[in-house]
Image (cartoon, coloured by chain):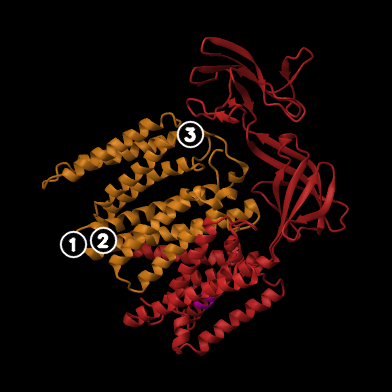
Chain colours: A orange, B red
């Protein structure tokens, strides 16, 4: 499969997520629509995952090179976090935020189609390529879910089990931070093998450091008993820094000489 | 869970002091830059940097152990100051991550404050110094006396301290040279781009062969008026094969024959040739509106002009494929050795020679795969083992943090 078939898969997945969300939200007291709703949402993820697998087979290289390809991974992984959180902790609302985020990234790919390109430049032909990018992807997915949980906490009505929902955004941030750290160090080790130095203050590296410092600051604020509701704002907004690091960097004046510009030129 | 017993109102009070202090050191750094013309900070080389770091470390350990009860020292190693300095570092990195970091770039006022060289500027250096003090003090307090429960804290914070301090201080001893190699010739000299001087290396390199593999060439439509390639209807980057079709609006093109390596015979017809001498030739046919056309196109080479087909004001061209792999086969002679050892330099596969790491860096891009020049980069970084120890301690600390987090959230 190629980007040519992508719109069908993307729109199919989005339709399943939307339909499933409507059914799940409408489930009455007896919960009769719960199973079909969840099934439909899972089908959406199955559709886009299937596309990713066939796409990978079609291009003969890991589809982790362009921003469009990483957005595709995002759309596959982030609803999975929502489903896992519901399965493990019986918190059902996170999955709605997750499918909205996933649809958002698919929509960007629909509006700005990627060029179908099989080539992988020598700098990316390394054993570090997959661990570095996958670890970062998982980190970003967890932190996106953490941000979604934080936005939920900010706007939800007062009452309920606050401690529990605050914990969700916090634990997702802790796990996300761990992956971010691994991604950062793996990137440094790879950079040493590929470019001769582990840290060159390339704009992407600098932004990776800024986002890492941002979450490092959060963890220390959390350890100081700062009011948890205020920290939800921090987590909600911290993800914006990650978005700059992920694809905003390309639009900054500093990006002219970045070695991380793997978009097709 | 506060590490140093600062809680409640004392916390908000010390937070204010901490933020104010961080702002002041950044401001002091900017003042130093402005008054010295934005020259930045330059660190001493070995052994000066090693002695300075050892004294700095000893000072932190001594202060932490002797003055732990002093309120000022407790504050200096406390979390509020740590957070303020993390934010200051993030803010300075933000400036360095937005503005181009090149010598001479940006407006005069930005150059005066060295905003175009943020990571070797005084505001950054002062912030890092106090950050290392803060991190170091809290680390000593968590380490002495040692408790196994603090292992994750110690690994992460000590790793960060070691990687940050050795990385920054060791940068003064980092040497990077470019070694231009020509096929059939030897050299033992490298060019240092920072000091703009030539350096004699303790070894010599003889380039036997530079070799490059490319991806398939690409059919493309070139618009000379706008000097750009026009994307085709499917936005494909294609694999050229006989029978392959591609279209742009009313223009459609089909590949009749594809010769990956060919050269022109006496009659001007392409015939298959060996891969070293030949260039890709593609015979295409197609229609543009009602007009039909056919002919050979080729990528050309440094020895041969490319062939293309004009369609109206645009040209159907064959773009050379991007480099897939390139490598230099070299003979390395260490010191006065007469017999050398063969080695292959490839991107992502550096070779170690006498404390130097050698990287395949580039080639003559105009000549492409016919390049007889190979650019090799030599890097010597004696502090690297310490930085890596720091990195692995950070990872170990994080792995423990992950394990604890998973336990806490009852995932495992």
On the image, the x and y values in percent for residue B83 come to 43, 72
* Picture quarter with the N terminus of chain B: bottom left
On the image, the x and y values in percent for residue B336 come to 87, 58
Q: Are marks 2 and 1 in contact (CB under 8 Å)?
A: yes
Quick one: which residue is furthest to the front in this view?
B108
Q: Are marks 3 and 1 in contact (CB under 8 Å)?
A: no
Dot 3 surroundings within 10 Å: few (below 14), some, or many (20 or more)? some
From the image, tell me which residue sits under label 2: A165
On the image, the x and y values in percent for residue A85 come to 29, 53
Q: CA distance from mark 3 to mark 1?
A: 47 Å
From the image, tell me which residue sits under label 3: A57
On screen, residue B181 above or below B400:
above
From the image, tell me which residue sits under label 1: A160
On screen, residue B57 above or below B186:
below
Whether residue B20 can be seen here: yes
Q: Earlier in the sequence, mark 2 or mark 1?
A: 1
- Residue at x-position 63% and y-position 25%: B318
- Residue at x-position 29% and y-position 70%: A227
Query: For the magenta stretch, what is the residue range?
Result: B130-134
Q: Are marks 3 and 2 in contact (CB under 8 Å)?
A: no
Q: Chain of mark 2?
A: A
Dot 1 surroundings within 10 Å: few (below 14), some, or many (20 or more)? few
- Residue at x-position 34% and y-position 50%: A81
Q: Earlier in the sequence, mark 3 or mark 2?
A: 3
Q: CA distance from mark 2 to mark 1?
A: 9 Å
Q: CA distance from mark 3 to mark 2?
A: 40 Å
Q: Chain of mark 3?
A: A
Check disc 3 and report its element: helix, strand or loop. helix
* Picture quarter with the C terminus of chain B: bottom left
On the image, the x and y values in percent for residue A243 come to 43, 51
Check if mark 3 and mark 1 are on a common chain. yes
Whether residue B412 can be seen here: no
């Amino acid at each position: 499969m190629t980007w040519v078939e992508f719109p069908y898969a993307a729109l199919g997945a989005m339709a399943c997520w939307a339909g499933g969300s409507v059914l799940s939200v409408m489930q009455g007291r007896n919960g009769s629509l719960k199973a079909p709703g969840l099934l439909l949402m899972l089908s959406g993820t199955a559709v886009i995952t299937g596309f990713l697998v066939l796409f990978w087979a079609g291009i003969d290289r890991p589809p982790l090179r362009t921003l469009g390809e990483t957005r595709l991974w995002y759309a596959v992984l982030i609803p999975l976090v929502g489903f896992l959180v519901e399965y493990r902790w019986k918190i059902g609302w996170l999955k709605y935020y997750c499918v909205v985020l996933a649809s958002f990234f698919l929509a960007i790919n629909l509006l700005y189609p990627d060029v179908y390109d099989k080539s992988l430049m020598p700098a990316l032909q390394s054993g570090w390529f997959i661990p570095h990018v996958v670890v970062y992807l998982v980190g970003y997915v967890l932190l996106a879910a953490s941000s979604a949980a934080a936005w939920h906490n900010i706007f939800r009505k007062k009452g309920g089990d606050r401690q529990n929902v605050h914990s969700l955004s916090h634990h997702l941030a802790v796990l996300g931070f761990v992956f971010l750290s691994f991604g950062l160090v793996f990137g440094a080790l790879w950079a040493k093998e590929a470019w001769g130095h582990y840290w060159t203050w390339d704009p992407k590296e600098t932004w990776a450091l800024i986002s890492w410092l941002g979450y490092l600051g959060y963890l220390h604020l959390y350890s100081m008993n700062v009011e948890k509701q205020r920290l939800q704002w921090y987590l909600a907004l911290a993800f914006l820094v990650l978005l700059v690091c992920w694809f905003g960097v390309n639009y900054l004046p500093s990006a002219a000489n970045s070695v991380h510009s793997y978009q097709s030129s | 869970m506060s590490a140093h017993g600062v809680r409640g109102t004392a916390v908000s009070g010390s937070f204010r002091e901490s933020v104010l202090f961080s702002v002041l050191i950044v401001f002091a750094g900017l003042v130093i830059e402005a008054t010295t013309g934005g020259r930045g900070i330059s660190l001493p080389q070995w052994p000066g940097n090693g002695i300075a770091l050892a004294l700095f470390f000893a000072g932190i350990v001594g202060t932490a152990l002797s003055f732990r009860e002093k309120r000022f020292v407790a504050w200096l190693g406390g979390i509020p100051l740590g957070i303020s300095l993390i934010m200051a570092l993030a803010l300075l990195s933000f400036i360095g991550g937005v503005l181009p970091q090149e010598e001479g770039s940006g407006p005069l006022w930005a150059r005066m404050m060295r905003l175009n060289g943020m990571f070797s500027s005084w505001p950054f250096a002062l912030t890092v110094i106090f950050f290392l003090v803060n991190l170091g003090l809290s680390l000593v307090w968590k380490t002495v006396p040692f408790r196994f429960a603090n292992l994750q804290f110690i690994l992460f914070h000590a790793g960060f301290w070691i990687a940050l301090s050795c990385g920054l201080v060791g940068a003064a001893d980092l040497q990077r040279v470019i070694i231009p190699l020509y096929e059939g010739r030897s050299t033992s000299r490298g060019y240092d781009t920072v000091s703009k001087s030539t350096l004699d290396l303790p070894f010599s390199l003889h380039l036997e062969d530079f070799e490059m593999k490319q991806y398939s060439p690409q059919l493309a439509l070139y618009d000379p008026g706008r000097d750009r390639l026009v994307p085709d209807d499917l936005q494909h980057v294609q694999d050229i094969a006989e029978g392959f079709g591609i279209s742009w609006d009313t223009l459609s093109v089909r590949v009749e024959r594809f010769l990956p390596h060919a050269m022109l015979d006496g009659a001007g017809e392409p015939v298959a040739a060996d891969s070293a001498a030949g260039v890709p030739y593609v015979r295409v046919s197609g229609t543009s509106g009602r007009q039909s056309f056919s002919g050979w196109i080729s990528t050309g080479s440094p020895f041969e002009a490319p062939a293309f087909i004009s369609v109206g004001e645009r040209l159907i061209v064959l773009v050379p494929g991007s480099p897939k792999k390139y490598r230099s086969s070299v003979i390395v002679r260490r010191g006065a050795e007469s017999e050398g050892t063969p080695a292959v330099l490839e991107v992502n596969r550096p070779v170690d020679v006498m404390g130097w790491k050698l990287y395949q860096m580039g080639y003559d891009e105009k000549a492409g795969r016919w390049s007889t020049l190979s650019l090799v980069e030599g890097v010597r970084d004696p502090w690297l083992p310490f930085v890596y120890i720091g990195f692995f301690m950070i990872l170990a600390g994080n792995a423990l943090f992950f394990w604890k987090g998973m336990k806490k959230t009852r995932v495992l």
